[in-house]
Image (tube, rainbow, N blue to C red):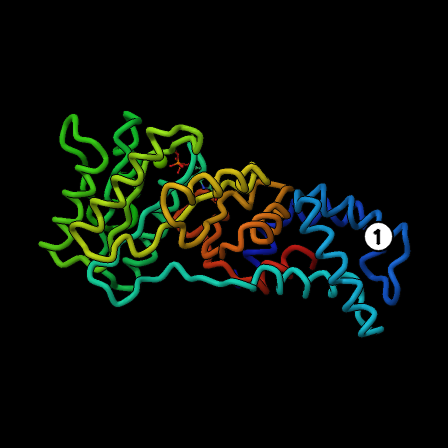
Amino acid sequence: MSLLDRFRSGLQRTRERMEQTLGAALGRRGAIDEATRAALEEALLAADAGPAAAERLMDEAERRMRADPALDLRHALERGVAQLMGATRARFTPGAERPWVALLVGVNGVGKTTLAGKLAAGFARDGRSTLLVAADTFRAAATEQLEVWASRAGVELVRARDGADPAAVVHDGLSAALARGHEVVLVDTAGRLHTKRNLMAELEKVGRVCARLVPGSPHHVLLVLDATLGQNGLQQAREFQRATPITSLAITKLDGTARGGAVLAIADQLKLPVSVVGLGEGLDDWQPFDPEAFARGLFE
Ligand SMILES: Nc1nc2c(ncn2[C@@H]2O[C@H](COP(=O)(O)OP(=O)(O)OP(=O)(O)O)[C@@H](O)[C@H]2O)c(=O)[nH]1
Ligand SMILES: [Mg+2]
């Protein structure tokens, strides 16, 4: 499947819902009348783009259509979305550091472990020696789950000794990576509610352990957000940023939702780049984020 097809199929439910509301209006050119603007607002809000991003996109589409009479609403929106989503860009790609250390953080059940497995598989396929660190010591089955992903991905895993806390596992993981010369270390952390102080403090501690063992690390902190939760991701991101600086966002489960527009609200409000999207439960069901393909997938 091409990049565009993957975004298009992931965004199918969101797109279909918007098309239902907008219908033929998407083909309209020239000035936007009141009725079209109302339908457009309804469609964007139904896709969970939120009032601010919806307003911004509508204004931007109008501006583009006034400037270019040949431009229809569909393509005006598409360009507006690509511009909004491309304003800040990030790639989840190792730098020159050895090892390059990345943390995956987020609330419960958003898809951190799954994504850690997918990303590890991608790096391994690129020939990078990759280590997964199972720093979720809360949930009984968490390590076994990551172990399954490690074997699928064909990478090594460091797990907790009995009774160890997450910081201790990260310590062991980074020591192992330094000793064995791994290029990439992906740390899967436990899901935590952004409202729980002690858990957020624990995340800070994990960050400090990283910096002590590998100066300058973590090199990337990936906040994983679940697209099906829509704009709830906004508050989560704000709280996580208080505990640890977020480098970029991963948006998972875009395939299962009609609320894919929430990505627009999140990008608009947080000014944080999206680096990765999850598009299913399989090993290959993810993509580096691409603003243009995302925009086309939303409207074409
Ligand atoms: N459809 C779909 N399902 C996904 C995606 N990513 C993860 N899932 C599913 O979401 C569920 C939770 O995924 P996990 O990876 O365990 O989530 P987690 O954030 O590690 O959960 P905790 O460790 O409990 O906080 C699983 O059933 C995954 O298969 C995705 O991109 N699309
Ligand atoms: Mg997990």
Pick whichever, 239 or 157, lies toward us.
239
Q: Horizontally, is 264 left or right of 90 in the view?
A: right
On screen, 298 above or below 237?
below
| Residue at x 58%, y 50% (from the top left corner) | 269
| Residue at x 75%, y 46% (from the top left corner) | 43
Pick whichever, 99 or 123, lies toward us.
99
Circle 1 residue:
37
Can the viewer see residue 290 in this picture? yes
Residue 206 position within the rendered picture, expressed as x and y whole percent measured from the top left: 25, 41
Q: Horizontally, is 294 left or right of 59 in the view?
A: left
Can the viewer see residue 4 in this picture? no
| Residue at x 29%, y 46% (from the top left corner) | 152
Q: How many marks?
A: 1
| Residue at x 44%, y 42% (from the top left corner) | 281
- Quadrant for the C terminus, please: bottom right
Dividing the image into four quarters, tell me where ligand 1 lies.
top left
Residue 246 position within the rendered picture, expressed as x and y whole percent measured from the top left: 40, 50
Residue 69 position within the rendered picture, expressed as x and y whole percent measured from the top left: 85, 73
Dividing the picture into quadrants, the one containing residue 188 is top left
Pick whichever, 174 or 119, lies toward us.
174
Residue 263 position within the rendered picture, expressed as x and y whole percent measured from the top left: 58, 49
Q: Which amino acid does label 1 sit on?
A: Arg
Q: Horizontally, is 69 left or right of 250 in the view?
A: right
Callout 1 crowding tier (Cα within 10 Å): few <14, some 14–19, many ≥20: some
Q: What element carries label 1?
A: helix
Pick whichever, 51 or 291, lies toward us.
51
Ligand 1 is within 8 Å of the C-beta of the residue at disc 1 = no
Toward the left, the furthest residue is: 179
